[in-house]
């Protein structure tokens, strides 16, 4: 046999380095180097002999030369950690193949061929959770972005589209359910207690959308009839004990299908749509064609165990993955630099879906809060990249808030510029033009231009430049006219020292001081470095409301009096702008010099918000919520976490004292409404728990028994968690009772135990870092489950008292975690690096400690590509 078969050691274990291990500097992949693949693979058949310890895979590829590419005398197939058994071409065993690193190269003469490659893999040993892996005794796959090469040798790139036929054979007792993409074709029993199933997916797809699931699962089933009359069988597959928590997921799926028909004219295209919930998953969920695989966190929900926010997150993620069937699957990406083509668009689609279902205002405020707390810091940090990056070392590192959330904002701006109807026309054109193709962001922009009649020449800079633009606003009032002078600057980011102006659409309104009203909104587009806009007909200087609805993802700096902000916080008819005015008041106090008047203005605005009967309680709570630490850090010139905790929590206490009676009475009177079904109950629960937090901030001795009562009498997880979040930050027997009760009550529910870890790791307590150390030793803690790791450590990294402990012990804890997970689960490990990478913005003492931890990681040797790329970017 081929001497190179020795690439597999005597026991069959590969002796080649795993692709995830990078002894050298990882190579840089560049967008400008794109070349089409030399071959097409119109069809692939996969035969799986499934087992937890060993799985055998036989792949049969039909390959033909790609007429759009330069001809090649061989085919290069990606691989990663595979044990190669045999290679055949057109039915003949071949020995003239060779390996280049992990890749398999097979010489091929011109023309059509059938390639046969047999490999073996070890799902139980797969701790990276990429490729085929085991979770709670079941087998499942994750192939995006480059996981398919861990299953079989294949051109694992999104521009190679194939029709898949998959046959799975397994023990019928351990794996009674066998699922794959598309529609089921055949199933049957075999000898020795084994069985098989065959699935066929008629829609050509890239390898990253392949999926299979084998396990002891049960399904909630339902049906959906599409607008074109297709009967679709729906299934939500879970372990049997989880079945009672699947109805919300199923209802969300049906709502998603209907909404995409009505809003985007998109109809489903298979006879089956299956969702499987998996307990061990690196991300939220995955849009595999016809077989979405989900983190259990985004499927399972009932009132006992899931909060209102959890319910909304399930619905949003179900929508997101379902919407990918068109924006991602029917039209996919040419290469991974185009990731925002599917992700930005699909995030926008899921945001609009949630807005339509539950109201636009609250959803928009929440989405912008996430953008500012996560994406803005990324955009101003060492890992800043355009929504369409120019280069990467490890693509997994680019599943970022920039590609996803800023990507969505960029498409939202096009929608704003086009108007809803024209945007829909352009979206239809995009789907029609590129159906069945692997497209680019440029294709999308061109469809927007042609379909909506826009000129987006300059707008394309949003795809090219990183960094959050800053807009300053000056106002001059003369005669009866107000002139706004706007200046924009896009900050320098790594590799992009000089920036060009971008078009910034800003919705504005001018409030008349006397009447307190405005005479309509205008959309202005700032597309130069400096530009003036004049509005006449104002008999007195009006009050400017700008970037209403957050039409552009920018930072606005304007000179505005405190009184005018108080007016807008109490009266702006755009809920986002109203919320924004309140946030500006809060930021002015929290980021400025401690100032009695600034705090007083917050009190005046809060008074009006508490007294405004026209507000629902959810919006009231939204308006009265303090900005998250991540955004305060981002807006600080030099962030001093210790001082910020004192300032922010001090403000909370001050507000709690000032409105002590009001918050106590809200907590009392909202008890009954909080038990109601529907939006009224949800709104009441939100305000009630916020009020509880203010009561406790002002007077822990009053807060603790109130919180314990809310905990004990809670009718569902929203009330229970709301109470426990407050108690977790206090001292005393109430805290201990509730935490102990919570643990025993939900001991067998992993997702709720995650909350138990999270609630304690979030607490702003003096020795929270020591408590987190203890929690890491708790028998329920495990490094093998990503949800559990995030529940403790991702939360810890966001807790200013824990992470930024002045001793540096918090930074060391995160660095140790990164090193521990580095090879075991590189993706998960790499996600923790940016928290240390933000050291440039932190006061010098802590900054030095943070940087030292990054250096310690860099010197630790054998880093995964994921961690290595993040660490070297962070060190700059
Ligand atoms: N496309 C998915 C996100 C996703 C990406 C990578 C994954 O593997 C680690 C998993 C999921 C989405 O946008 O939902
Ligand atoms: Zn997505």
Image: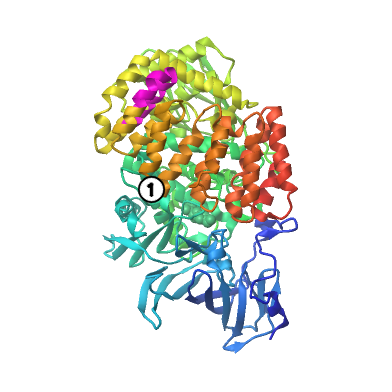
What is the secondary structure assignment of the residue under circle 1? helix
Which quadrant of the figure contains the N terminus?
bottom right
Q: Is residue 384 visible?
A: no
Which residue carries the number 1 mark?
A: 314
Q: Furthest-bottom residue in view? A: 92
Q: Quadrant of residue 823?
A: bottom right
Residue drawn at (65%, 62%), measured in percent from left and top?
34
Majority secondary structure of magenta residues: helix
Q: Where is residue 305 in the image (x, y as percent from the top left)?
A: 35, 44
| Quadrant location, the C terminus | top right
509 relative to 672 in the view: left or right? right
Residue 72 as seen in the image, left or right of residue 405: right
**Camera-side residue: 825 or 636?**
825
> Above or below — where is 53 with respect to 806?
below
Residue 513 in which image quadrant: top left
Magenta-span inclusion, residue 691: yes
Q: What stretch is highlighted in magenta?
A: 685-707
Up the image or down, 39 lies above or below 708; here it is below
Residue 183 image offset from top left, x and y in percent:
37, 71
- How far across and how far down the image is residue 622, in percent? 40, 29
* Residue 598 belongs to the span the image colors magenta: no
413 or 244, nearer to the observer: 244
Task: Give left or right: position of 107 versus 424.
Answer: right
Q: Is residue 428 visible?
A: yes
Within 10 Å of the Cα at label 1, are there few (<14), some (14-19), or many (20+) other Cα atoms?
Answer: many
């Amino acid at each position: 046999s081929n001497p190179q078969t020795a690439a597999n050691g005597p026991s069959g274990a590969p002796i080649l380095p795993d692709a995830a291990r990078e002894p050298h500097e990882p190579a840089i992949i560049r967008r400008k180097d794109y070349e089409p693949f030399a071959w097409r693979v119109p069809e692939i058949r996969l035969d799986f002999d499934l087992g937890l310890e060993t799985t055998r895979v036989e792949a049969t590829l039909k390959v033909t030369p790609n007429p759009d590419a330069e001809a090649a005398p061989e085919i290069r197939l990606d691989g990663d950690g595979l044990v190669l058994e045999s290679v055949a071409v057109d039915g003949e065993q071949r020995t003239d193949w060779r390996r280049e690193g992990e890749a398999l190269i097979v010489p091929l003469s011109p023309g059509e061929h059938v390639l046969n490659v047999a490999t073996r893999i070890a799902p139980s040993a797969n701790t990276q959770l990429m490729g085929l892996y085991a979770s709670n005794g079941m087998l499942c796959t994750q192939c995006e972005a480059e996981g398919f090469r861990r299953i079989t040798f294949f051109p694992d790139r999104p521009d190679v589209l194939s029709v898949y036929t998959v046959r799975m054979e397994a023990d019928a007792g351990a794996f009674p359910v066998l699922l794959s993409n598309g529609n089921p074709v055949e199933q049957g029993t075999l000898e020795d207690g084994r069985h098989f199933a065959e699935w066929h997916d008629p829609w050509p797809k890239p390898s990253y959308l392949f999926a299979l699931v084998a396990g002891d699962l049960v399904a909630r089933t339902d049906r959906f009839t599409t607008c074109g009359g297709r009967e679709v069988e729906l299934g939500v597959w879970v372990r049997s004990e989880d079945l009672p928590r699947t109805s919300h997921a199923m209802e969300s799926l049906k709502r998603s299908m209907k909404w995409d028909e009505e809003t985007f004219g998109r109809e489903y295209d298979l006879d089956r749509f299956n969702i499987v919930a998996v307990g061990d998953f690196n991300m939220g969920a995955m849009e595999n064609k016809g077989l979405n695989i989900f983190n259990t966190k985004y499927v399972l929900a009932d009132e006992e165990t899931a909060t209102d926010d959890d319910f909304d997150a399930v619905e949003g993620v179900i929508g997101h993955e379902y919407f990918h069937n068109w924006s991602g699957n029917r039209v996919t990406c040419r290469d991974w630099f185009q990731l925002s083509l599917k992700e930005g668009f699909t995030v926008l689609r899921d945001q609009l879906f949630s807005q339509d279902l539950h109201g636009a205002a609250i959803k928009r405020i929440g989405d912008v809060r996430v953008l500012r707390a996560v994406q803005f810091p990324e955009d101003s940090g060492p890992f800043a990249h355009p929504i369409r990056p120019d280069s990467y070392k490890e693509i997994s590192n680019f599943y970022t808030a920039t590609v996803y959330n800023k990507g969505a904002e960029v498409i939202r701006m096009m929608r704003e510029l086009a108007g809803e109807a024209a945007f829909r026309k352009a979206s239809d054109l995009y789907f029609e033009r590129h159906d069945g193709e692997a497209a680019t962001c440029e294709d999308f922009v061109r469809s927007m231009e042609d379909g909506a009649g826009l000129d987006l020449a300059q707008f394309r800079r949003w795809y090219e430049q990183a960094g959050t633009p800053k807009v300053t606003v000056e106002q001059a009032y003369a005669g009866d006219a107000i002139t706004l002078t706007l200046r924009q600057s896009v900050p320098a980011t790594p590799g992009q020292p000089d920036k060009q102006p971008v078009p910034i659409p800003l919705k504005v309104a001018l409030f008349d001081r006397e009447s307190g009203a405005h005479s309509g909104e205008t959309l202005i587009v700032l597309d130069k470095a400096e530009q003036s806009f004049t509005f006449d007909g104002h008999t007195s200087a009006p009050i400017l409301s700008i970037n209403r609805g957050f039409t552009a993802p920018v930072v606005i700096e304007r000179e505005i009096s405190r009184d005018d902000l108080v007016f807008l916080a109490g009266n702006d008819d755009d809920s986002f702008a109203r919320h924004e005015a309140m946030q500006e008041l809060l930021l002015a106090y929290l980021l400025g010099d401690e100032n009695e008047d600034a705090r007083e203005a917050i009190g005046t605005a809060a008074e009006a918000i508490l007294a405004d009967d026209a507000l629902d309680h959810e919006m009231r709570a939204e308006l009265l919520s303090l900005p998250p630490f991540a955004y305060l850090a981002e807006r600080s010139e030099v962030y001093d976490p210790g001082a910020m905790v004192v300032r922010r929590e001090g403000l909370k206490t001050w507000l709690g004292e000032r409105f002590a009676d009001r918050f106590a009475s809200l907590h009392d009177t909202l008890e009954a409404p909080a038990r109601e079904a529907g939006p009224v109950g949800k709104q009441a629960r939100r305000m009630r728990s916020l009020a509880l937090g203010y009561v406790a901030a002002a007077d822990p001795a009053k807060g603790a028994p109130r919180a314990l009562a809310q905990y004990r009498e809670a009718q569902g997880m929203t009330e229970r968690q709301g109470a426990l979040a407050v108690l977790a930050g206090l001292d005393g027997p109430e805290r201990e009772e509730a935490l102990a009760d919570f643990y025993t009550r939900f001991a067998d529910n992993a997702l709720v135990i995650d909350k138990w870890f999270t609630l304690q790791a979030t607490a702003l307590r003096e020795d929270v870092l020591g408590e987190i150390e203890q929690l890491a030793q708790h028998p329920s803690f495990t490094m093998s489950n990503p949800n559990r790791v995030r529940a403790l450590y991702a939360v810890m990294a966001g807790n200013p008292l824990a992470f930024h402990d002045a001793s540096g012990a918090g930074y060391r804890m995160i660095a140790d975690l990164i090193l521990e997970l580095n090879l075991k689960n590189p993706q998960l490990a790499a996600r923790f690096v940016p928290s240390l990478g933000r050291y440039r913005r932190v006061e010098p003492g802590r900054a030095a400690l943070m940087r030292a931890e990054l250096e310690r990681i860099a010197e630790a040797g054998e880093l995964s590509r994921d961690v290595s790329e993040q660490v070297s970017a962070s060190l700059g």
